[in-house]
Amino acid sequence: MDTTEHDLKLLSIGYYVQGGLVTFYSLIFFAYVGVMGAVMFTALKEAAKSGSSANQVPGWLFPLLGTLITAVLLVIVASGLCLLYAGLALRRRKHYIFLLVMAGLSCFAMPYGTLLGIFTILVLQRPSAKALFGRAPAFPPALPQQ
């Protein structure tokens, strides 16, 4: 009994869950960074008003940190959206190579992502899964005739 279609459906749900969690937590982190940025901006403004120069923060530090944090947030949100799209692609049986790449990248998110990535790679390598995605199964090369 071939369970490939059922396994692909379960993997799709797993990618929806992982993508939703990654996106949700990145948005919470974004809100946290926004609040902390407002607090730091207010603290710096008050310190500049008081004229205290003993503990001044260099002017270039906060724009640099803001740029780095924004870049990290964008990468995390993009990865969450890619995980959600991987769930959709699994359900529609499209983008085989994209799914293999996302399965490999998902292996870095321990422990849940590792299990999801390994099982995705194992299921996608089945000949029945390749047939569902419209890919011909790979046959070993023919031996040369002598």
Image (cartoon, rainbow, N blue to C red):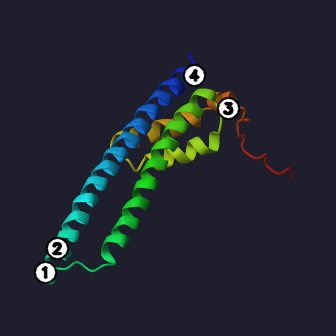
Which one is earlier in the sequence, the residue at label 3 or at label 2? Answer: 2
Question: In the image, is residue 21 above or below residue 146?
Answer: above
Q: Amino acid at mark 3?
A: Phe
Q: Secondary structure at mark 1?
A: loop
Residue closest to the eye, 75 or 63: 63
User: What is the residue that sits farthest to the front in this orientation?
Assistant: 49
Q: Identify the disc placed on residue 133.
A: 3
Question: In the image, is residue 89 above or below residue 141?
Answer: above
Asked whether disc 4 touches disc 3, contact meaning CB atoms under 8 Å apart, the reply is no
Provide the residue designation for mark 1: 52
> How many residues crowd mark 2 within 10 Å: few (<14), some (14–19), many (20+)?
some
Q: Amino acid at mark 4?
A: Glu
Image location of residue 82, percent across then percent down: 52, 43
> How many residues crowd mark 3 within 10 Å: few (<14), some (14–19), many (20+)?
some
Which one is earlier in the sequence, the residue at label 2 or at label 4? Answer: 4
Q: Identify the disc placed on residue 107.
A: none
Residue closest to the eye, 27 or 89: 27
Q: Choose top left, top right, bottom left or bottom right for residue 129.
A: top right
Residue depicted at 58% across the width and 35% down the height? 124
Asked whether disc 2 touches disc 4, contact meaning CB atoms under 8 Å apart, the reply is no
> How many residues crowd mark 1 within 10 Å: few (<14), some (14–19), many (20+)?
few
Q: Nearer the viewer, mark 1 or mark 3?
A: 1
Q: Secondary structure at mark 4?
A: helix
Image location of residue 5, percent across then percent down: 57, 22
Provide the residue designation for mark 2: 47
Residue closest to the eye, 94 or 138: 94
Q: Identify the disc placed on residue 5.
A: 4
